[in-house]
Image (cartoon, rainbow, N blue to C red):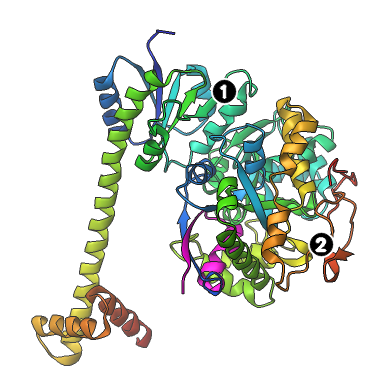
Amino acid sequence: MIAATLSLGFLPLVDAAPLIVAHEMGFAAEESIALDLRRAPSWSSVRDMLSFGRVEAAHMLSPVPVAVALGLGGAGTPLSAVSVLSMNGDGIGVSNELAARMRAGGHDFDYVDARKAGEALIAHASHPLRLGVPFPFSMHAELLYYWLTALGMPAPQNVDIRTVPPALMAQAMEAGEIDAFCVGEPWGSMAVENGVGTLLLPGNAIWKSSPEKVLAVRSDWAEAEPDLLGRLIRAVWRAGRWLAEPGAPTLAAELLSRKEYLDLPAEILDRALTGRMVISARGEERQVDRFIEFHRGGASFPWRSQAEWIGIQLAARTGLDRASAARAARAVFRSDLYRAALQGTRADLPGASSKIEGALSEATAVASVSGRLFLGPDSFFDGRIFEPTGS
Amino acid sequence: MTATLSIVVVEPDRDRALLIVDSLRDAGDFDVHVIAEPTGLARRIQALKPDLVLIDLENPSRDMLEELALASGPLDRPVAMFVDRDGAGLTEAAIEAGVSAYVVDGLKATRVKPVLDAAIARFRMFQRMRTELAETKRALEERKMIDRAKGMLMRARGIDEDAAYALLRKTAMDQGKRVAEVASALVTAAGLLG
């Protein structure tokens, strides 16, 4: 018995996997809902499809609903992030020309050390550095700004930021419009595959646990349809748990590669899912732990402290009041709705809804509803911590 | 503000751009610019300082326009997705038709309406053409698949074309499937068997 069909907007990216898996592997059907997945051409169109009620829920960049709450972009319809769909998963890449200069200067492209890679980038890039990001409100932009600013190149003030849709990133690099990018997979790997770019760092080298995409709904819809929302959150949570199983990446890559989803070779999608990245056209491989994480370490929990971190970054850049931005941002990540939906399932929920960000350098046990939950490491590359103002 | 409304149309396809410009000209006296190339889109729009920007919802370059919301600070010269102020459901109609409009904040809805009405009508037509094209392509592909399946049956069973088609149709009816689906399954299976 299907209670309802929910339409969901998504962009062709590896981190849309929980939604695609929830549909294809029957986790949605287990919750008596059907999912109608609609591929969208751009982030602004996903946001507007959601705002104007063309879809019930969407795969969305974690800063977008926060930006909407701060009055930045969009039609102003309040949006809620009810679950984190994926943690980490971005990649920074540089043009082959810049990579050659960096190699000549002694950089080894270890794909691990953010400080070393950033210093090499700043030393060898022509200025202003031209950076491609998929959207002005994105974890991609936040990670780049945090990283470069911490290394003494205040961003975005001193860089030339260009918005380039993910699928066009490799093309923009080939056309010589950008020197570097931060983009979600598989589009970094596609730049390698097309012989135009070299991967410099995984996003988690900058922040070990950044909320990348969220499951977003209209706040009024969440109020009006608590039952359907609960079903959707549980179906997507189970899909995330399935994705964390050892054999899942191979099958997931096959599903995602289908024409109606990403329409790209499974072999390329497999790289991000397994963390076995090919960083250059000469085939150098790097193994990355937690390149993208859908489930382990409480990855899908919408921490209010992470929303607050995003809100404060956006406020600092746009001249908004930080305290009220922090308050508004916190209210966007709905850990309350996430808890309500997963109560009574086997999900282990943390005791708190907010945490100090950046304090864990390795996996750490924390108090949780059923005992102890292991959170993954969440440190920033420069060792700073972020203390949220609210709980 | 009574000066001529200036409009930027972002459209890479030349013919479509001309059609849009024509229908805008019919709707009123506007100053219309077309930008075809996505390179440096936000900067070029900023230089033109239009009152209104129209772009296909399907155009991935649309995300570049979001920079405009940040360009000169959120309080300075906001460019926002048009939000209804007259209750005529213009934004919804626009999204349904596949056009997105960015409007300088403070521009009166009465001045925007004729522009959007014309754009919406034009984009609806594009949408119909897009659907028709997709349908035609699908029909053609199915036709080709059925022809290949017929050919296989004719060779394997030594029957003529009509009999081969009748066999496909009967199988489809028995299995509650479409003829094209049965044909496609046969061609795939034959490919696997070598």
Q: Chain of mark 2?
A: A
Q: Chain of mark 1?
A: B
Residue at screen point 78% across, 54% down: A209
Residue B51 figure quarter: top left
Q: Nearer the viewer, mark 2 or mark 1?
A: 2
Mark 1 Cα-neighbour bin, 10 Å: few <14, some 14–19, many ≥20: many
- Find the magenta span and give its range: A1-27
In this view, the residue in front, A242 or B96, is B96
Residue at screen point 63% across, 74% down: A248
Query: Which residue is label 2 attached to?
Result: A350
- Distance between mark 2 and mark 1 Cα atoms: 40 Å
Q: How many marks?
A: 2
Q: Amino acid at mark 1?
A: Pro
Q: Amino acid at mark 2?
A: Pro
Which label was assigned to residue B78?
Answer: 1
In this rendering, is residue B190 above or below B28? below
Q: Is residue A16 magenta?
A: yes
In this rendering, is residue B7 above or below B132? above
Q: Is residue B9 left or right of residue A334?
A: left
In this rendering, is residue A204 above or below A101? below
In this rendering, is residue A206 above or below A260? above
Q: Is residue B165 left or right of residue A29?
A: left
Which x, y percent locates residue A252?
58, 70
